[in-house]
Image (cartoon, rainbow, N blue to C red):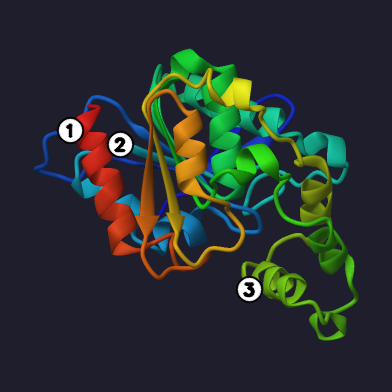
Amino acid sequence: METRRADLGSVEIAYADVAPAAGVAPQPVPVLLIHGFASNRGVNWIATGWTSTLSRAGYRVVALDNRGHGESAKLYRPEDYHTSLMAGDAIGLLDRLGIERAHVMGYSMGARIAAFAALEHPGRAETVLLGGLGIHLVEGVGLPLGIADAMEAPSLEVLTDPMQRMFRAFAEQTRSDLRALAACIRGSRQTLSRDEVARISMPALVSVGTRDPIAGSPHELADLLPRGRALDIPGRDHNLAVGDRVHKEGVLAFLAEHR
């Protein structure tokens, strides 16, 4: 899938722009996909079948690599990874593509970015879809700081903590820039207050695996959203919930309600 690039001034962002499948009636509002920590658009959205699923349903799909990830620019100061800045990258890409409104969908860290984008740029999100992130949007600050230490460890072999090992192994698998990821973890530790979540007024879907120890309850977060709905992804942990069939079917049904 062709890599495109957008110079947003302070950062260059790599992305894919997928047209609706041939012979399918195009949907009027595109979908913007925002991936999780240490991932990229290819791993999070293309390899899991999300881009093809949405394209076959008639959606134009834009999937970006977040700053510090994939083929986008690598930055090494924690302050360059404030969640509002990454949300601004997503909206800036929509500006560059001439897209006025989009269904904004994120997973894990990408869901945190999507929530900030929906709050800070409310006129740009038709709906917001938060995968792999529940009440920890409010009550947590993302992944433990120890993940940054794991990125800076001399090797995977010296790590003993299971979560540190999991994320270091994943980062190596995705051939990520470990120093950039350490800065990202340290700089993107923002939450939203309950009052701020209550100001996210567009329809919202919160989708979390029932065996996910990282996200927090999707039902508690959905209850705070004025038009929120929770989707349980049965038997799936944080990693396996991404491309699960129940997840895809739930998202497609939700989008169909809000064309």
Q: Residue at x 84, y 62 (%)?
A: 146
Q: Residue at x 57, y 55 (%)?
A: 40
Label at residue 115: none
Residue type beneath disc 3: Gln
Label at residue 26: 1
Expressed as whole percent of the image width and height from the top left, the position of residue 109 reads 62, 47
Contact between marks 1 and 3 (CB within 8 A): the answer is no
Instruction: Give whichever of discs 2 and 3 has the lower sequence position.
Output: 2
Q: Secondary structure at mark 1?
A: loop
Residue that mark 3 sits on: 173
Query: Up-down: is 141 above or below 95?
Result: below
Instruction: Give whichever of discs 2 and 1 has the lower sequence position.
Output: 1
Q: Residue at x 89, y 72 (%)?
A: 153
Separation of residues labelled 2 and 3 (CA atoms): 29 Å
Quadrant in the picture for residue 22: top left
Query: In terms of depth relative to the viewer, which is nearer, 7 or 247?
Result: 247
Q: Quarter of the image containing the C terminus? A: top left
Separation of residues labelled 1 and 3 (CA atoms): 35 Å
Mark 1 packing: few (<14 Cα in 10 Å), some, or many (20+)?
some
Q: In the visual, does 94 lie left or right of 146? A: left
Query: Up-down: is 99 above or below 242?
Result: above
Expressed as whole percent of the image width and height from the top left, the position of residue 41 reads 51, 52
Residue type beneath disc 1: Pro
Separation of residues labelled 2 and 1 (CA atoms): 8 Å
Query: In terms of depth relative to the viewer, which is nearer, 253 or 71?
Result: 253
Expressed as whole percent of the image width and height from the top left, the position of residue 70 reads 62, 54
Quadrant in the picture for residue 137: top right
Q: Secondary structure at mark 3?
A: helix
Residue that mark 2 sits on: 60
Q: Is residue 257 visible?
A: yes
Q: In the visual, does 227 lie left or right of 198? A: left
